[in-house]
Amino acid sequence: GAVVSQHPSRVICKSGTSVKIECRSLDFQATTMFWYRQFPKQSLMLMATSNEGSKATYEQGVEKDKFLINHASLTLSTLTVTSAHPEDSSFYICSAVPGGNEQYFGPGTRLTVT
Amino acid sequence: QKEVEQDPGPLSVPEGAIVSLNCTYSNSAFQYFMWYRQYSRKGPELLMYTYSSGNKEDGRFTAQVDKSSKYISLFIRDSQPSDSATYLCAITPGGTSYGKLTFGQGTILTVHP
């Protein structure tokens, strides 16, 4: 149980374009999902908290107009990187909380902006 | 000072060894403690979750928390090559901030046959 999926697993896009990443909880409902970013050989950094039915909450230093988050249902959250630039290239990981404090992560999406 | 400090290693041990991974944290508000395992280019996998001082055992893994010292550990007994991965400690205050995890830097572990 507690499976989280992400799509796509890998994406390459040109600078200036937008990319959408999906995060789904497959066997549970999650009113809250989280989006993290991980640079090579670094730990995960929380970007934002995605709440079903309301606006996302962004961490300090994360541009909300650049990283658009939509929590469309209790099993789906999307992250759209708008006007992507090479410095946005990173490993984006989502997580979901089925209840309590345990958190389950998706397999990640590797974004490369050329 | 970082909220969570973790020795990045790398740590290399022979198969069958006991591995000790450690983190320290600075804020006593953190009440929930987790250990994740992350294989290369994959998302983290939850290994252990605890919220009280003391030991919690699950198979070959033991999580230890000492809130008075703000110190958490993960012990792996009879380590296997398949345990080779990056291990991340993560903490959260819980309550209204539950789920907002702060991660350590991760320790790269290699278990060689």
Image (tube, helix red, strand yellow):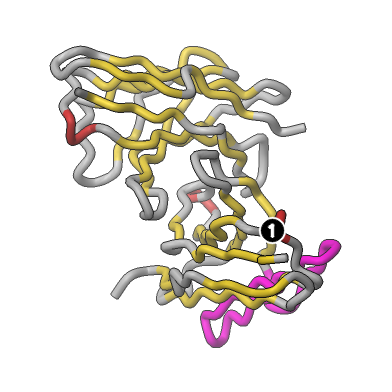
- The amino acid on which the numbered mark 1 sits, given as a three-letter code, is Asp
User: Residue B94: image x %, image y %?
Assistant: 54, 55
Question: Residue, x 59% and y 24% (percent of image)?
Answer: A5
Number of other residues with Cα within 10 Å of mark 1, as a class: few under 14, some 14 to 19, many 20 or more: some
Residue shown at 40%/34% (left/top)?
A: A92
Decide if residue A4 is on the left or right side of residue B100: right
Q: Residue at x 57, y 65 (%)?
A: B109
Residue A84 in the figure: left or right of residue B48: left
Q: Is residue B78 magenta?
A: no
Label 1 sits on residue: B83
Q: Which residues are magenta?
A: B52-75
A43 shown above or below B64: above
Instruction: Tell me if residue B4 comes above or below residue B37 in the rendering.
Output: below
- The chief SS type of the magenta part is strand
Chain to which the residue tagged by mark 1 belongs: B
* Front residue of B72 and B61: B61
Which element carries disc 1, helix, strand or loop? Answer: helix
Q: Is residue B54 above or below residue A7?
A: below
> Which residue occupies the extreme front position in the image?
B113
Residue at x-position 46% and y-position 27% = A51
Residue A103, image quadrant? top right
Q: Nearer the viewer, residue A74 or A25?
A: A25
Placement of A56 over or under A48, stated as above or below: above
**Residue A114 % position (x, y):** 19, 23
- Residue A57: x %, y % from top left: 34, 35
Whether B73 is among the magenta residues is yes
Extreme-bottom residue of the structure: B69
